[in-house]
Protein backbone atom coordinates (compact mmCIF):
# COMPACT_ATOMS: atom_id res chain seq x y z
CA UNK A 1 0.00 0.00 0.00
CA UNK A 2 1.31 3.42 -0.95
CA UNK A 3 2.43 5.75 1.82
CA UNK A 4 0.78 8.85 0.32
CA UNK A 5 -2.32 9.63 -1.71
CA UNK A 6 -2.16 12.41 -4.29
CA UNK A 7 -5.30 13.51 -6.12
CA UNK A 8 -5.48 15.61 -9.25
CA UNK A 9 -8.80 17.44 -8.97
CA UNK A 10 -9.21 18.09 -12.72
CA UNK A 11 -7.14 18.34 -15.88
CA UNK A 12 -7.43 18.91 -19.63
CA UNK A 13 -4.19 17.24 -20.70
CA UNK A 14 -4.02 14.20 -22.98
CA UNK A 15 -1.50 12.50 -20.69
CA UNK A 16 -0.36 12.70 -17.08
CA UNK A 17 2.84 10.75 -17.69
CA UNK A 18 5.15 13.64 -16.68
CA UNK A 19 3.34 13.98 -13.34
CA UNK A 20 3.45 10.24 -12.76
CA UNK A 21 7.18 10.16 -13.43
CA UNK A 22 7.88 12.90 -10.88
CA UNK A 23 5.51 11.54 -8.25
CA UNK A 24 7.24 8.16 -8.52
CA UNK A 25 10.07 9.75 -6.49
CA UNK A 26 7.76 9.37 -3.49
CA UNK A 27 5.64 6.41 -2.45
CA UNK A 28 2.41 7.73 -4.01
CA UNK A 29 -0.98 6.46 -5.07
CA UNK A 30 -1.97 8.89 -7.85
CA UNK A 31 -5.74 9.34 -8.20
CA UNK A 32 -7.13 11.10 -11.25
CA UNK A 33 -10.45 12.96 -10.96
CA UNK A 34 -12.45 15.45 -13.00
CA UNK A 35 -14.13 17.55 -10.32
CA UNK A 36 -16.20 20.63 -11.09
CA UNK A 37 -17.94 21.39 -7.78
CA UNK A 38 -16.83 21.82 -4.17
CA UNK A 39 -18.70 18.66 -3.25
CA UNK A 40 -16.87 16.63 -5.86
CA UNK A 41 -13.50 17.97 -4.68
CA UNK A 42 -14.30 17.08 -1.08
CA UNK A 43 -15.35 13.56 -2.08
CA UNK A 44 -12.17 12.99 -4.09
CA UNK A 45 -9.68 14.72 -1.81
CA UNK A 46 -10.93 14.26 1.76
CA UNK A 47 -8.10 11.85 2.69
CA UNK A 48 -5.49 13.07 0.19
CA UNK A 49 -1.98 13.95 1.35
CA UNK A 50 -1.37 16.11 -1.70
CA UNK A 51 -3.54 17.79 -4.31
CA UNK A 52 -2.80 18.93 -7.85
CA UNK A 53 -5.32 21.47 -9.10
CA UNK A 54 -6.24 23.10 -12.38
CA UNK A 55 -9.68 24.77 -12.35
CA UNK A 56 -11.78 22.97 -9.70
CA UNK A 57 -12.68 25.15 -6.68
CA UNK A 58 -10.63 24.61 -3.52
CA UNK A 59 -12.56 26.93 -1.26
CA UNK A 60 -12.55 27.30 2.51
CA UNK A 61 -15.45 24.84 2.65
CA UNK A 62 -13.31 22.29 0.80
CA UNK A 63 -10.15 22.94 2.82
CA UNK A 64 -11.98 22.51 6.12
CA UNK A 65 -12.91 18.96 5.05
CA UNK A 66 -9.37 17.91 4.14
CA UNK A 67 -8.11 15.46 6.74
CA UNK A 68 -4.49 14.81 5.73
CA UNK A 69 -3.57 17.42 3.15
CA UNK A 70 -0.05 18.80 3.32
CA UNK A 71 0.23 20.51 -0.06
CA UNK A 72 -1.91 21.93 -2.87
CA UNK A 73 -0.01 22.57 -6.10
CA UNK A 74 -1.68 24.47 -8.90
CA UNK A 75 -0.93 24.33 -12.59
CA UNK A 76 0.13 27.86 -13.54
CA UNK A 77 1.03 31.19 -12.02
CA UNK A 78 -2.36 32.22 -10.64
CA UNK A 79 -3.82 30.61 -7.53
CA UNK A 80 -7.29 32.15 -7.65
CA UNK A 81 -8.95 28.71 -7.46
CA UNK A 82 -7.58 28.22 -3.93
CA UNK A 83 -8.55 29.95 -0.69
CA UNK A 84 -5.03 30.87 0.38
CA UNK A 85 -5.97 32.15 3.83
CA UNK A 86 -7.86 28.97 4.69
CA UNK A 87 -4.98 26.79 3.50
CA UNK A 88 -2.42 28.79 5.46
CA UNK A 89 -4.52 28.62 8.63
CA UNK A 90 -4.60 24.83 8.31
CA UNK A 91 -0.85 24.64 7.72
CA UNK A 92 -1.31 23.50 4.13
CA UNK A 93 1.41 24.53 1.70
CA UNK A 94 0.18 26.16 -1.53
CA UNK A 95 2.53 26.08 -4.51
CA UNK A 96 2.35 27.29 -8.10
CA UNK A 97 4.74 27.58 -11.06
CA UNK A 98 5.80 31.14 -11.72
CA UNK A 99 8.31 30.83 -14.54
CA UNK A 100 7.19 28.15 -16.98
CA UNK A 101 5.75 30.37 -19.72
CA UNK A 102 7.42 33.77 -19.56
CA UNK A 103 8.40 33.67 -23.22
CA UNK A 104 5.11 32.18 -24.38
CA UNK A 105 2.88 34.76 -22.67
CA UNK A 106 5.09 37.73 -23.49
CA UNK A 107 5.29 36.53 -27.11
CA UNK A 108 1.52 36.12 -27.25
CA UNK A 109 0.87 39.55 -25.74
CA UNK A 110 3.23 41.07 -28.30
CA UNK A 111 1.52 39.12 -31.08
CA UNK A 112 -1.86 40.52 -30.02
CA UNK A 113 -0.41 44.04 -29.82
CA UNK A 114 1.01 43.75 -33.32
CA UNK A 115 -2.15 42.14 -34.70
CA UNK A 116 -4.23 44.98 -33.25
CA UNK A 117 -1.78 47.59 -34.50
CA UNK A 118 -1.61 46.25 -38.06
CA UNK A 119 -5.31 45.17 -38.12
CA UNK A 120 -4.13 41.69 -39.18
CA UNK A 121 -7.28 39.77 -38.19
CA UNK A 122 -9.64 42.46 -39.47
CA UNK A 123 -7.93 42.56 -42.88
CA UNK A 124 -7.73 38.76 -43.05
CA UNK A 125 -11.48 38.55 -42.52
CA UNK A 126 -12.11 41.29 -45.09
CA UNK A 127 -10.08 39.50 -47.77
CA UNK A 128 -11.76 36.16 -47.05
CA UNK A 129 -15.16 37.83 -47.41
CA UNK A 130 -14.19 39.18 -50.83
CA UNK A 131 -12.97 42.68 -49.95
CA UNK A 132 -9.43 43.21 -51.33
CA UNK A 133 -8.93 46.78 -50.12
CA UNK A 134 -6.32 48.11 -47.68
CA UNK A 135 -8.78 50.83 -46.66
CA UNK A 136 -10.74 48.18 -44.72
CA UNK A 137 -8.08 48.61 -42.01
CA UNK A 138 -7.85 52.42 -41.94
CA UNK A 139 -6.45 53.96 -39.78
CA UNK A 140 -3.18 52.12 -39.09
CA UNK A 141 -0.40 53.93 -37.22
CA UNK A 142 3.33 53.24 -37.15
CA UNK A 143 4.29 51.07 -34.17
CA UNK A 144 7.72 52.61 -33.56
CA UNK A 145 7.58 55.57 -31.19
CA UNK A 146 4.23 54.67 -29.66
CA UNK A 147 3.72 53.84 -25.96
CA UNK A 148 2.99 50.49 -24.37
CA UNK A 149 1.53 50.54 -20.87
CA UNK A 150 1.96 47.45 -18.72
CA UNK A 151 -0.56 46.81 -15.94
CA UNK A 152 1.62 44.78 -13.59
CA UNK A 153 5.39 44.50 -13.88
CA UNK A 154 6.31 40.99 -12.82
CA UNK A 155 8.47 38.52 -14.72
CA UNK A 156 6.24 38.22 -17.80
CA UNK A 157 5.69 41.95 -18.44
CA UNK A 158 9.38 42.57 -17.75
CA UNK A 159 10.15 40.05 -20.50
CA UNK A 160 7.60 41.75 -22.76
CA UNK A 161 9.16 45.18 -22.09
CA UNK A 162 12.48 44.07 -23.56
CA UNK A 163 10.82 42.61 -26.66
CA UNK A 164 8.59 45.65 -27.17
CA UNK A 165 11.49 48.08 -26.86
CA UNK A 166 13.31 46.18 -29.61
CA UNK A 167 10.43 47.20 -31.90
CA UNK A 168 10.75 50.85 -30.93
CA UNK A 169 7.95 51.04 -28.40
CA UNK A 170 8.29 53.22 -25.31
CA UNK A 171 7.31 51.30 -22.17
CA UNK A 172 5.61 52.53 -19.00
CA UNK A 173 4.15 50.39 -16.23
CA UNK A 174 1.87 50.48 -13.21
CA UNK A 175 2.64 48.18 -10.30
CA UNK A 176 2.48 49.30 -6.65
CA UNK A 177 4.83 46.49 -5.61
CA UNK A 178 7.47 46.90 -8.27
CA UNK A 179 11.20 47.11 -7.57
CA UNK A 180 11.94 50.55 -9.03
CA UNK A 181 15.58 49.67 -9.62
CA UNK A 182 14.45 46.76 -11.80
CA UNK A 183 12.20 49.14 -13.74
CA UNK A 184 15.06 51.58 -14.30
CA UNK A 185 17.31 48.79 -15.54
CA UNK A 186 14.62 47.86 -18.06
CA UNK A 187 14.14 51.48 -19.22
CA UNK A 188 10.58 51.42 -17.93
CA UNK A 189 8.89 54.34 -16.22
CA UNK A 190 6.60 53.52 -13.28
CA UNK A 191 3.42 55.60 -13.26
CA UNK A 192 -0.01 55.67 -11.63
CA UNK A 193 -2.81 53.77 -13.39
CA UNK A 194 -4.66 56.89 -14.54
CA UNK A 195 -1.51 58.28 -16.16
CA UNK A 196 -0.82 54.94 -17.83
CA UNK A 197 -4.31 54.94 -19.34
CA UNK A 198 -3.94 58.50 -20.60
CA UNK A 199 -0.51 58.02 -22.19
CA UNK A 200 -0.64 54.51 -23.63
CA UNK A 201 -1.36 53.58 -27.22
CA UNK A 202 -1.46 49.93 -26.15
CA UNK A 203 -2.24 48.58 -22.69
CA UNK A 204 -1.21 45.02 -21.84
CA UNK A 205 -2.74 43.54 -18.68
CA UNK A 206 -0.53 41.30 -16.53
CA UNK A 207 -1.89 41.82 -13.00
CA UNK A 208 -2.72 38.70 -10.96
CA UNK A 209 -6.37 38.16 -10.06
CA UNK A 210 -6.90 39.10 -6.41
CA UNK A 211 -9.70 41.11 -4.83
CA UNK A 212 -7.82 44.39 -5.26
CA UNK A 213 -7.34 43.80 -9.01
CA UNK A 214 -10.77 42.41 -9.87
CA UNK A 215 -12.34 44.86 -12.32
CA UNK A 216 -9.45 47.32 -11.96
CA UNK A 217 -9.73 48.17 -15.66
CA UNK A 218 -13.22 49.60 -15.79
CA UNK A 219 -15.30 52.57 -16.91
CA UNK A 220 -12.98 55.25 -15.57
CA UNK A 221 -9.88 53.67 -17.07
CA UNK A 222 -11.47 53.27 -20.52
CA UNK A 223 -12.70 56.86 -20.45
CA UNK A 224 -9.12 58.02 -19.93
CA UNK A 225 -7.71 56.01 -22.83
CA UNK A 226 -7.05 57.40 -26.29
CA UNK A 227 -9.69 56.65 -28.90
CA UNK A 228 -7.03 54.94 -31.05
CA UNK A 229 -5.72 52.83 -28.15
CA UNK A 230 -6.00 49.05 -27.79
CA UNK A 231 -6.12 46.89 -24.68
CA UNK A 232 -4.65 43.37 -24.53
CA UNK A 233 -5.21 40.83 -21.76
CA UNK A 234 -3.17 37.65 -21.32
CA UNK A 235 -3.56 37.53 -17.51
CA UNK A 236 -7.01 36.80 -16.06
CA UNK A 237 -10.33 37.85 -17.55
CA UNK A 238 -11.92 39.41 -14.44
CA UNK A 239 -9.09 41.94 -14.08
CA UNK A 240 -11.04 43.76 -16.82
CA UNK A 241 -14.64 44.78 -16.12
CA UNK A 242 -16.08 43.12 -19.22
CA UNK A 243 -19.34 45.05 -19.22
CA UNK A 244 -17.39 48.32 -19.12
CA UNK A 245 -15.07 47.09 -21.88
CA UNK A 246 -17.99 46.19 -24.13
CA UNK A 247 -19.50 49.63 -23.52
CA UNK A 248 -16.22 51.36 -24.33
CA UNK A 249 -15.88 49.39 -27.57
CA UNK A 250 -19.47 50.01 -28.59
CA UNK A 251 -19.14 53.75 -27.91
CA UNK A 252 -15.80 54.01 -29.71
CA UNK A 253 -13.96 55.15 -26.58
CA UNK A 254 -11.10 52.79 -27.51
CA UNK A 255 -10.08 51.27 -30.84
CA UNK A 256 -10.17 47.59 -29.96
CA UNK A 257 -8.97 44.70 -27.82
CA UNK A 258 -6.94 41.50 -28.00
CA UNK A 259 -8.24 39.07 -25.39
CA UNK A 260 -6.73 35.70 -24.57
CA UNK A 261 -8.88 35.55 -21.43
CA UNK A 262 -12.43 36.66 -20.60
CA UNK A 263 -14.53 36.92 -17.44
CA UNK A 264 -16.23 33.55 -17.92
CA UNK A 265 -14.47 30.79 -19.82
CA UNK A 266 -15.36 29.48 -22.28
CA UNK A 267 -16.90 32.70 -23.58
CA UNK A 268 -20.70 32.76 -23.74
CA UNK A 269 -22.14 32.26 -27.22
CA UNK A 270 -24.17 35.47 -26.83
CA UNK A 271 -21.25 37.70 -25.82
CA UNK A 272 -21.20 40.96 -27.83
CA UNK A 273 -17.43 40.56 -28.08
CA UNK A 274 -17.95 37.76 -30.62
CA UNK A 275 -19.61 40.17 -33.03
CA UNK A 276 -16.96 42.91 -32.85
CA UNK A 277 -14.52 43.12 -35.74
CA UNK A 278 -12.13 45.23 -33.66
CA UNK A 279 -11.77 42.46 -31.04
CA UNK A 280 -9.39 39.48 -31.33
CA UNK A 281 -10.36 36.51 -29.15
CA UNK A 282 -8.17 33.53 -28.23
CA UNK A 283 -9.07 30.55 -25.97
CA UNK A 284 -6.70 31.15 -23.00
CA UNK A 285 -3.76 29.81 -24.97
CA UNK A 286 -0.98 32.33 -24.28
CA UNK A 287 0.72 30.00 -21.78
CA UNK A 288 0.97 27.11 -24.22
CA UNK A 289 3.85 25.60 -26.13
CA UNK A 290 4.89 21.97 -26.11
CA UNK A 291 7.91 22.95 -24.04
CA UNK A 292 6.03 25.08 -21.52
CA UNK A 293 3.35 22.44 -21.02
CA UNK A 294 5.94 19.80 -20.12
CA UNK A 295 7.69 22.24 -17.79
CA UNK A 296 4.40 23.16 -16.12
CA UNK A 297 3.36 19.57 -15.54
CA UNK A 298 6.76 18.53 -14.23
CA UNK A 299 7.18 21.46 -11.84
CA UNK A 300 3.62 21.23 -10.52
CA UNK A 301 4.17 17.59 -9.58
CA UNK A 302 7.63 18.34 -8.19
CA UNK A 303 6.06 20.80 -5.72
CA UNK A 304 3.99 17.96 -4.29
CA UNK A 305 6.86 15.50 -4.24
CA UNK A 306 9.13 17.96 -2.42
CA UNK A 307 6.59 18.44 0.37
CA UNK A 308 5.84 14.74 0.76
CA UNK A 309 9.59 14.13 1.08
CA UNK A 310 9.78 16.70 3.89
CA UNK A 311 10.91 19.98 2.34
CA UNK A 312 9.35 23.22 1.14
CA UNK A 313 8.80 23.41 -2.63
CA UNK A 314 10.79 25.68 -4.90
CA UNK A 315 7.58 27.53 -5.78
CA UNK A 316 6.10 28.10 -2.33
CA UNK A 317 3.27 30.64 -2.66
CA UNK A 318 1.95 31.12 0.88
CA UNK A 319 5.25 31.80 2.61
CA UNK A 320 3.33 32.66 5.81
CA UNK A 321 2.70 28.93 6.25
CA UNK A 322 6.28 28.58 7.52
CA UNK A 323 5.10 30.13 10.78
CA UNK A 324 2.89 27.08 11.36
CA UNK A 325 4.93 24.51 13.25
CA UNK A 326 2.56 21.67 12.28
CA UNK A 327 3.26 21.86 8.53
CA UNK A 328 5.34 18.69 8.39
CA UNK A 329 3.68 16.95 11.33
CA UNK A 330 0.43 15.81 9.70
Image (cartoon, rainbow, N blue to C red):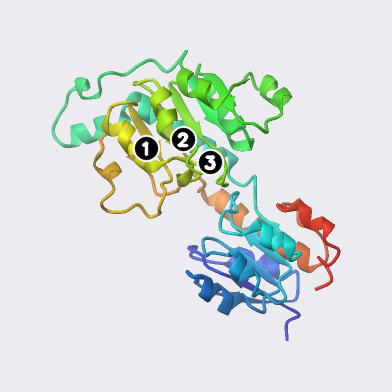
Q: Is residue 45 visible?
A: yes
Q: Which residue corresponds to mark 1?
A: 244
The residue sitting at the right extreme is: 325
Residue at image position (44%, 48%) is 284
Q: Which residue corresponds to mark 3?
A: 104
**In what element is the residue under mark 2?**
loop
Residue 242 percent across, percent down from the top left: 38, 42
Residue at image position (48%, 63%) is 12
Give me the C-alpha separation between circle 3 and circle 1.
28 Å
Residue at image position (36%, 36%) is 245
> Which quadrant of the rendered structure holds the N terminus?
bottom right
Give me the C-alpha separation between circle 2 and circle 3.
23 Å
Q: Residues within 10 Å of mark 3 (few under 14, many from 20)?
A: some
Q: Residues within 10 Å of mark 1 (few under 14, many from 20)?
A: some
Residue 70 percent across, percent down from the top left: 74, 68
The mark that comes first in sequence, 3 or 1, is 3
The mark that comes first in sequence, 2 or 3, is 3
Residue 269 percent across, percent down from the top left: 27, 53
Side of 308 where 80 appears, left or right: left
**In what element is the residue under mark 3?**
helix
- Nearer to us: label 3 or label 1: 1
The residue sitting at the bottom extreme is: 1
The residue sitting at the top extreme is: 145
Q: Nearer the viewer, residue 113 or 84?
A: 84
Side of 141 where 232 appears, left or right: right
Q: Which residue corresponds to mark 2?
A: 217
Amino acid sequence: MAKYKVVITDYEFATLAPEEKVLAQADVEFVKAQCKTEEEVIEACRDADGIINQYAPISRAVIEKLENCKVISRYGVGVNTIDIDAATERGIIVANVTDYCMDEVSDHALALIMACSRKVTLLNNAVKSGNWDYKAGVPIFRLRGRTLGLVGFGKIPQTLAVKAQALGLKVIAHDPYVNKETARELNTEIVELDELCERSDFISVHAPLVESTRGMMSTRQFSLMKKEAFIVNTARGPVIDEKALIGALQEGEIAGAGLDVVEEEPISSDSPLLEMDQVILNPHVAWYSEESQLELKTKTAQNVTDVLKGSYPAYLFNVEVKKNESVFVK
